Every structure is written in C-alpha cells, then in structure tokens.
Amino acid sequence: MPEISVKSRSFGESVIRRMTRVAMEHGAINLSQGFPDFDPPAVLLEAAARVMKDGPHQYAVTWGAANFREALAAKQERFMGIPVDPAGHLTVTCGATEAMMAAVMTAVDPGDRVIVFSPFYENYLADAILAGAEPVCVPLREGVSGSGDFGFDPDELRRAFEGGAKALILCNPANPTGKVFSRAELETIAGLAERYDAFVITDEVYEHIVYAPHRHTYFAALPGMFERTISCGSLSKTYSITGWRLGYTVAPKRITDGIRKIHDFLTVGAAAPLQEATIAALGLGDGYYRDLQDLYTSKRTLFLSALERAGLSFVRPQGAYYVMVDIDEFGAPSDTAFCEWMARDIGVAAVPGSSFYLSGPDGRDAVNRYIRFHFAKRDETLVAAGERLLALRDRWATRREIGRRETDR
C-alpha cells in the first residue's frame, strides 16, 4: 500500500484539541482549549438571527465581503494607528489559523528558515512544516527581562537571524505564556528584521485582552515595519465567537496579493452570513473594549487566586487568557501523564506544556515543566475548577505513595 506523505507524518495531532476530548471523556472542566462558555455580545446575536433569515447565503468575494472589509478596516485603523485600505490591505480568512497558514506560505519557500519564540502556540510548528520551511526556536525564559515574565536574549535572537531566517512569527499578546512584548523588545525585533531583511508575521488575536500596566503595541505600526509585516488577527477572542472562524490579515498590497491567491485555493472564503452579522460588532465603541479588559482582568484575579490557594506556582500573565503553571515539584513522569491524571482524578483539564516546545531551553527540562490553563470561563466555572484543584496536592501524593508500594512488592 502507498505511504502517506513524509510531511503529514512529521508532526502530531493538536494536543490542545485532544485534551478537549479527554476533558469530555472524563467530564472534566475544560481549561485546556481556550474558548469561552459565555455568550457573544447581544448586538452580535441579534444581527446573526436577522442575517440567518435575510441572508446573504451564497459566496462572498473570495477575500471578504466589501462591507465587512470596510467595517474591519475602520476598526483596525482606529486601534493600530495606521492606514488600513479595505481594498488593498485586508484579506478575510477562515479564522486566524488559516490567516497564519496563508501568511507563512506567502512569506517563505521550501527550505527557508522561520524563527519562532519558544514556548509557542502549537500551530506555528505545523505551519512551518506544511510550508516546507525549517522552524528555528529562540527560547523565552522566566526572568530574562528582569520582571519575572518570559523574556528573550537579544544575542540569541540575532544569531537566529544570522542563520538565514526569512521570517519571524510573533504572537503578541502571547499564547501560551500570556507575555505582552514591550515596545523596547519589539524595537529590538524590528531592528533585526530590517538588518537581515526578514518578514515578521504577527498573531495578534488577543490584541484587546491586556492587563494594566501593560499595553499592546502593534508591530506593523512601528516605524518602517508595515512594509515587511503580515498582521494576523481574529474576531474569535474579542467577540467570544471562536466557532464562527472569522480571521484576517493586514499587509501591504504587494504581500496581500500573494496572500489572497493562497487563501483562495485553501478555503475559497469565509462564511458570508457570519461576515454580515459581525459588522454590527465591529461598530461597537471604546466602552466595549474597556469592558472586555475589565471582564478578563476580573477573571484573571479570580483564577490566579484559586491557583494560589491550591499552592501552585505560576507566571502571572500580562495579556491573553492563559497561565503557565510550574509542575516541576510534583516529579511527574511527564506533563502529559500529569494532565491526563488531573482530568481523570481531579476533574480539571489543562494542556501539557510539551506541546508548546520543540526542545527544552538551556539545559532545563522545560518540556515537562509546565502545564497551561485558560480562564475564559464564567466565574462559576472558574470557582468550581478552583475547588477541585484544592485536592490536587493530596491526591497526587496519594497516587505516588500507592505507586511506591506497588513497586516495592
């Protein structure tokens, strides 16, 4: 029988999505895959109901319905602080997942190198492999920036560029770490990208979920960076519509022309009725985005307090809605085994950190050191998860004791 391609065998299934299936199997609270359990804004639901009756129900223009692109361009121009031409700069995609894939395939050729900060969102590795490129990891380490967050060493990044990188993928605010890159860090990246003539592909789906005093800086808005940047975004997190799969890219016309060709043959286009319905949300005023920040700031406080009560060590997120928890002290055989046990015996599902690493940085086994929770859930869901996590230490200690006794027999 013929073999499937080497490319399709060179990476595994999504660990995040697999952990959702594990959560469902054991009836665990799913804090693994990052989607809310609360409704989108009422204005969005009302518009969706209207559109389902009145249409449109057929193909939109491949790269996005004109009225949707105009509304999206106005919203992004307002926040990014740079001109966004709906006709020449915007491509609407089936979620940021497709936006990133189309961006990578537009920027690099087979054999090119792509820099990825590690830990990274798992899709980036697959994106590089599917494009025939070689991923090059630059580690983010706790405390490098002097503030306890995940920082990078500028010399390590420079060496990665010197190795011939064609592009860098930047997730900001970052999944899985919750890091918000400072303007100084972004300027370091910008200087190297310009010096070595590389693209920067940004994943900014958490642009509106940032915790004070941190601020989100759009990379494309830095001096001279728009011409070499592909900004990828999504409406999923901002409007709590992860199942609608509406994403987009913002890029100069010469790059957008390439993205649109690849997008056309990947998916043809995003759902026309959902584009129409979402126009109502794109017109929301600044108050909506302030309320969104307040909502997630409250959820972060609630869930981090629960982690503290459970005696767990974590790195405080600066943005997005994830938190990396350090499980090194538990001495688990692997982070995957720990997460599967936790879903089964504690009733809370997380993502093993190994899915965010290619290899452990600077001699420490970071691959098995972290797990990731998300807190984009109703308060009552987070409270219930916190109550269950209170039993984690005692039950893990009991499990290890039973294991020792069985080994001694």
Image (cartoon, rainbow, N blue to C red):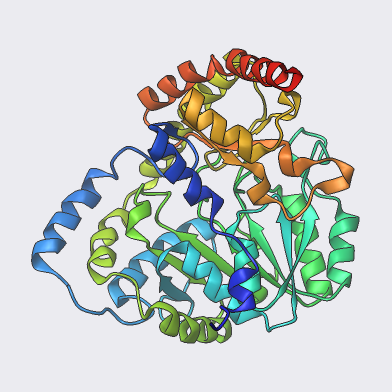
Quadrant where the C terminus is found in the figure: top right
Q: Is residue 276 above or below residue 5?
A: above
Q: How many numbered circles does the render carry?
A: 0
Closer to the camera, 365 or 243? 365
Task: Give how far across and how far down residue 34 sits, in percent.
Answer: 47, 44
Residue 247 appears in view: yes
- Tell me residue 89's x, y (percent): 49, 77
The residue most toward the front is: 409
Q: Nearer the viewer, residue 98 or 272?
A: 98
Residue placed most toward the observer, 252 or 27: 27
Q: Position of residue 23 (x, y in %)?
A: 43, 38
Residue 347 quadrant? top left
Against 154, residue 132 (above or below) is: below
Residue at the spot 73% in from the left edge and 22% down from the top edge: 407
Residue 400, compared with residue 122, is above or below; it is: above
> Residue 197 lies in what quarter of the image?
bottom right
The image quadrant of residue 235 is bottom left
On screen, residue 235 versus residue 214, left or right, reads left
Q: Is residue 8 left or right of residue 377?
A: right
> Residue at (74%, 27%) from the top-left corner?
331
* Residue displayed at 57% across by 82% down: 255
Residue 329: percent from left, percent from top: 75, 24
Name the residue: 89% across, 44% down.
363
194 or 325, which is in the foreground? 325
**Residue 226 in view:** no
Residue extending farthest to the left is 53
